Amino acid sequence: MAVEASTRRRFGTEALARIDQRPALVTFVVLLIVYMATASWTLPYHIDPLTNVLTAWKLGADGSVVVEEQAELTGPEYHNVVNQLLQTPRGPVSKYPPGASLLAAPWYAVFSETDIQEVSFVVETPDGPRAGVLEMPIPALWPSTLTAVLTTAAAMAVLAALIRPVVGDRWAWVGALLVGLGTSLWSVAADSLWQHGPTAMWLLLGIWGFSRSRYLAGSAAFGLAVITRPQTAIIVAVMGVWAAIREKSVKTLIEAGAPAAIGAALYIVFNRYLFGSAVEYDAGGYWVEGTVSRSAWNTVEPLVRAFFDGQRGVLVWSPFVVIGALAYFRLCKGLPWWLPAAATAGLVYLVIQVRGNGYAGGTGFLWYRYQLETLVAAAPLIVAGFAAAWEKSRIWQWSAAATGVASVTAHAVAAVG
């Protein structure tokens, strides 16, 4: 699987440096075009990313996360219906961390106007579905959608650059495109401003740093992932401990953990400022409570569904992952430590994620989303295995081709539909 040495002999070190960025550039440009063609630029817009839009707009326009313009539409009767805003002593604020909104905020410093728009909704109640139409002030959606598109495409460009020394130029961009188009990174993360696109970018930059023993830089990127999606602290914890044990170094443990810990501390300070507690129940405390209190069965059952559920199962809707993982363990030997470390960290993350908050991730999207951070962490290993499968035999090759086409087709349907 190591292609880098032969490439050096053929082109020389200087030429290799010139072509290093080509797989990443090809990946970024192709995905940018595809994502922009299929993303959600106007209403309807899922209420989870719409709440991030509102926060991004307020940050850009006023430097605040308090969305007082939505005060009349904040409260139990509107929460999880038309937005995910919570009432606090400081005013209406999003229940989500600020990381994704911070990336979109600079756009809104320039494009800060809002329009009163009619928003239709349908919500399931114990008495059946309830539908209605509300008027609410909504800023332009395109800056937030563009942020989602750019960060998700950038994440896959980082993946291409990260895996290139392991699999070579061709499989670096082919593999990154497969992950970018054969998973819900296309149909969910790149569609609108969820947390998943920015988190994917920061996670892969963190893994990139660890893969080159630049633990401070990698941990800083992980810290930004924590500010965006706090549960990802699990991933940096596992990888940091793995690296420290491997190098038998307390210094490595400190470098791998300190910047990410600062990110976690900033998130706690942010929560205390808004809610008065480290983790407000409605803003993530429910996940902490579920993680601590649920039974073993309430971990095993959603974990199995996260892989095999007919609607949300990652192996059902991205079957190329099966081939990549199997081929890695069957065919790949002597590859860098950070591939299994990142994949293991992603799996630990998924176990705790589904224990705390189930596997479904809500409604209004296809096909899955809670598994995305696990897929991102495991992506280098999956691409390495997929490349090895393609080169092994005709049976492996046909299996890889069939599952790859099926995965991209499934998410093309989801992205377009």
Image (cartoon, helix red, strand yellow):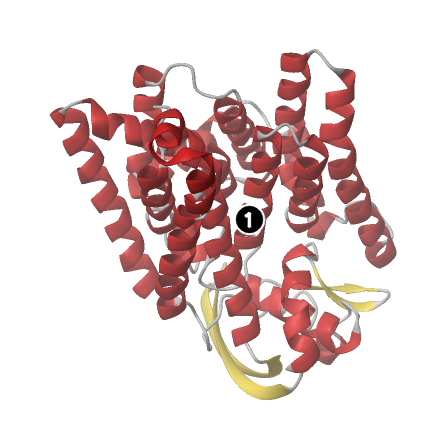
**Residue at (85% x, 67% y) in the render:** 90
Q: Nearer the viewer, residue 130 or 410?
A: 410
Q: Disc 1 designates what residue? A: 201
Q: Is residue 51 above or below residue 324?
A: below
Instruction: Name the residue type under label 1.
Output: Met
**Is residue 118 placed above or below 240 in the rendered structure?**
below
Q: Name the spot of residue 290 as percent of width and height, x first.
A: 64, 36
Above or below 46: residue 226:
above
In the drawing, does residue 359 fall left or right of residue 34?
Answer: right
Residue toward you, 414 or 400: 400
Spot occupied by residue 386 in the image (x, y as percentages of width and height):
30, 31
The number of discs equals 1
> Hey, which residue is sitting farthest bottom in the picture?
116
> Which image quarter is the N terminus in?
top left
- Residue lying at 69% horizontally and 36% vertically, measured from the top left: 219
Q: Is residue 29 visible?
A: yes
Quarter of the image where one finds residue 143: bottom right
Mark 1 closeness class: few <14, some 14–19, many ≥20 residues within 10 Å? many
Quadrant of the image containing the C terminus = bottom left
Q: Which residue is drawn at 28% across and 37% down?
A: 319
Q: Position of residue 336 (x, y in %)?
A: 49, 21
Q: Extreme left residue here?
A: 394
**Local secondary structure at mark 1:** helix
Q: Residue at x 43, y 20 (%)?
A: 335
Left or right: 349 as drawn, with respect to 417: right
